Image (cartoon, helix red, strand yellow):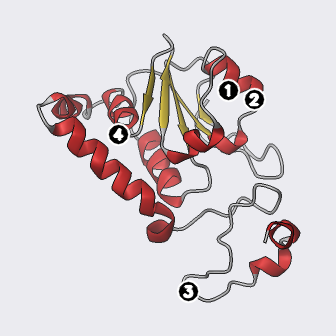
Amino acid sequence: MRGRSGAAGAAGERRRGSADAGLTVLYDGGCRLCQGAVDRLQALKPSEPIRYAAVQELTEDELQRLFRGAPPASGQLLEKIHAVARDGAVYAGSAAVVRALRSVRGFGRIAWLYRLPGMRPLADALYRYVAARRYAWFGRVSNGCGADCAMPSGRGSDGGGDGHEAECDHRKETQ
């Protein structure tokens, strides 16, 4: 199965890829950078089936099955991208990016750079730096309103209010 699977719930499901994937990539569905990266990766031709799934759209049962009974907390899953291989190996942060790139024709040879001395700590530091600023730099994705609303709270692109808070009852409850 390729492309979007269509809306499947209030937030609009964005699961992509094969159900029998050799690799499952979990990303922050509320992050524009993350969704853009997934869109670009999916447009490339992987050498193995890859399933992309927004963390916010996975059920606890799905996470239990994927991580074989011991999933990280949702906060940890949203903190950085995760890739889970069919054999159960889990990659997080820059290691997950490199693992996904290894599966894409033409990028596998580039991914070996990660193994060079000093590259892993450098890649990890760069990943953490960008991840900590991703919402400020790229914004959040609107997946509709609900308890897990991904809309920015009170900031439009000009830094002013976007009027969204008035539409979100849960914002009033949590503030």
Counting residues from the start of the chain, the first of labels 2 and 4 encountered is: 2
Counting residues from the start of the chain, the first of labels 4 and 1 encountered is: 1
Location of mark 4 (residue): 94
Location of mark 1 (residue): 63
Residues under numbered marks 2 and 1 in contact, where contact means CB atoms less than 8 Å apart: yes
| Quadrant for the N terminus in the image | top right
Residue in the image at 75% along x and 60% along y? 149
Residue in the image at 43% along x and 63% along y? 133
Residue 138's spot in the image, x, y percent? 47, 67
Counting residues from the start of the chain, the first of labels 2 and 3 encountered is: 2
Residue 9's spot in the image, x, y percent? 83, 46
Label disc, if present, on residue 133 of the rendered structure: none
Please determine whether, in this image, residue 152 is positioned above or below residue 95: below
Q: Amino acid at mark 3?
A: Gly
Location of mark 3 (residue): 159
Residue in the image at 55% along x and 86% along y? 159
